[in-house]
Image (tube, rainbow, N blue to C red):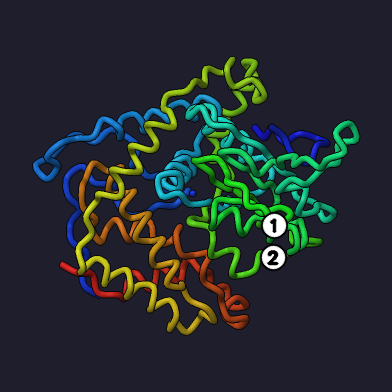
Amino acid sequence: MSDTPENPQYEGASSPAPQPAPGAPQPGFTPTSPPEPLSPVSPGPEVPQYSELVGTLARIRTEVGKAVVGQDAAVTGLVIALLCRGHVLLEGVPGVAKTLLVRALAQSLSLDTKRIQFTPDLMPGDITGSLVYDARTAEFHFREGPIFTNLLLGDEINRTPPKSQSALLEAMEERQATVDGVPRLLPDPFMVIATQNPVEYEGTYPLPEAQLDRFLLKVELPLPPRDIEVQVLRRHADGFNPRDLAAAGVHPVATIADLAAARAEVEKVQIDDAVLGYIADVCRATRSAPSTSLGASPRGATALVATSRAWAWLSGRTFVTPDDVKTLAVSTLRHRIQLRAEAELEGVTTTSVLDGVLASVPVPR
């Protein structure tokens, strides 16, 4: 269900852990085990007042599901990133609807979206914009690049040289683009959703650790199981057009104001010192693991704090539990960890390292 255009460069996801509270999501935020944080959660005794905004954001997944089948976990990851003002690295083979997923999400939130096809000859000015000479006025005028949007899809980001990759660094961190010495603010919300192919590495430029650390989450999009793939084929056989989302019934169900209000509520979610200590211990354990040459940085720890709070809020709670941390740890930290060469040869993965860390670090009670 990919809708990737053919030519243009751009267009306009130890101690025994305490039992989770009733209604709380279970650990395992992985694409192969989709979570259910966006479903409305009935208020239990621990929730004094249920937020209607959770229900509003829950409808986003329903709308996106009208166009994209079987990628609930990826949609959840994108919503968490929006709530945390973060960016997402999507990894999946071609043809698993990465572009369609972003377009459907933008449609459900009434957000502007643009797409950049990263190629070896792409220049930084093709991303940020450049000064153009106007012969009629004999002056230079700034022409905005595709980065001036709400949701920026960077397709195959590892196919462009580091010089062009670095054009995103300022935008991702400072929410601005500086051209000819003049900083220009980007729209709010602003999120970079970059994709890369996990299979083909010939002619690619792997993202440096400093840039990987800028992404809040890394979400993997697997090939769908047979029943989901049959649903995809049925939709196309019935006339589904991935280039016409309105005809598919995808409509706005939330606004920028709803998103801003939800962000304010997420920032009010409480997190105990014991849970903060648990997050620090998890991140420190990744640095001393025998299979790693580089562990999660303090920025990774703060990212895990943010994603855990967003997950707790989406679950209808006003506080973070260790299970929230466990649920988001893999997606938040796996791209921030570098393995030793000998560990990679033995088949060790960053996910398996994190699974071992989560199993060994004591959980606060």
Viewer-proximal residue, 294 or 135?
135
Q: Which residue is mark 2?
A: 206
Up-down relation of residue 229 to residue 287 (above or below): above
Report the residue at 65% width, 44% height from top: 147
* Residues at marks 2 and 1, CA–CA distance in whole angstroms: 28 Å
User: Which comes before the other along the chain, label 2 or label 1?
Assistant: 1
Task: Report if residue 16 is visible in the image.
Answer: no
Crowd rating for badge 1 (residues with CA inside 10 Å; few <14, some 14–19, many 20+):
few
On the image, the x and y values in percent for residue 184 come to 62, 47
Q: Quadrant of residue 307?
A: bottom left
Q: Which mark is residue 129?
A: none
On the image, the x and y values in percent for residue 15 come to 21, 72
Report the residue at 25% width, 61% height from top: 322
Residue 67 horizontal side relative to residue 280, left or right? right
Pointers 2 and 1 in contact (C-beta within 8 Å): no
On the image, the x and y values in percent for residue 364 come to 19, 69
Residue 103 horizontal side relative to residue 181, left or right? left
> In which quadrant of the rendered image does the C terminus lie?
bottom left
Q: Amino acid at mark 1?
A: Gly
Crowd rating for badge 2 (residues with CA inside 10 Å; few <14, some 14–19, many 20+):
some
Report the residue at 33% width, 55% height from top: 308
> In which quadrant of the rendered image does the N terminus lie?
top right
Viewer-proximal residue, 355 or 146?
146
Residue furthest to the right: 135
Q: Amino acid at mark 2?
A: Pro
Q: Which residue is mark 1?
A: 181
Up-down relation of residue 25 to residue 56 (above or below): below
Viewer-proximal residue, 51 or 260?
260
Residue 118 horizontal side relative to residue 63, left or right? right
On the image, the x and y values in percent for residue 285 come to 38, 78
Disc nearest the viewer among 2 and 1:
1
Query: What kind of element bears circle 2?
Result: loop
